[in-house]
Image (cartoon, rainbow, N blue to C red):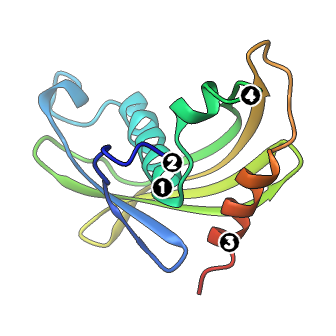
Amino acid sequence: MNETAPQTGHINEREHHLPIRIYYEDTDFSGVVYHASYLRFMERGRTECLRLTGIGHKELLEGETPLAFAVRRMTIGFARPAIIDDVLDVQTCFTAARGARIEVQQKILRNGEVLVSAEIQIACIDLNGRPKRLPAALNTLLVSFLNRN
């Protein structure tokens, strides 16, 4: 992990919390968050959570066997809209890691109210897009995160 990279968000037990402020660029013409913006917020949440567990995307790409993550499946529910200037809490919880697959649950909340929830399946892939088993060191880091109490 790059030790000079800033740490964003915090982990409380098994859950990562990332604060996100809504800017004009995140909204549609009416000041309501555009639905695709939530996908970016969740991607940032997963990335920062992994960074805090010691897994950096750059290090994965520069490893002996270059690897990356790709979203394979996502089920998402939109309950309420966020609007410009809201401060949201992107919550990320890794629920399983086995083989080439990582499973994640995410929620986006405003003042404790769930606005968006998602279940995501991520695949570990090589640079040709083929699934690759999680390297042992990566699996160990994720399992230790999954088992935090």
Tell me residue 11's x, y (percent): 42, 70
Disc 4 to disc 3, C-alpha distance: 23 Å
**Residue 64 numbered mark, or none:** 4
Q: Which residue is mark 1?
A: 49
* Nearer-the-camera pick, 62 or 70: 62
Q: Residue furthest top?
A: 128
Disc 1 to disc 3, C-alpha distance: 13 Å
Picture layout, residue 55 above or below residue 92? above
- Is residue 70 shown left or right of residue 78? right
The residue lying at 22 percent from left, 36 percent from top is: 32
Q: Which residue is mark 2?
A: 46
Disc 1 to disc 2, C-alpha distance: 5 Å
Tell me residue 73's x, y (percent): 72, 37
Disc nearer the start of the sequence (2/3): 2
Check contact, mark 1 vs mark 2: CB within 8 A. Answer: yes
* Nearer-the-camera pick, 119 or 93: 93
Q: For the residues carrying marks 1 and 3, which lies nearer the camera in this image?
A: 3
Amino acid carrying mark 4 in the image: Glu
Q: Which residue is mark 3?
A: 144
- Is residue 72 shown left or right of residue 84? right
Disc nearer the start of the sequence (4/3): 4
Check contact, mark 4 vs mark 2: CB within 8 A. Answer: no
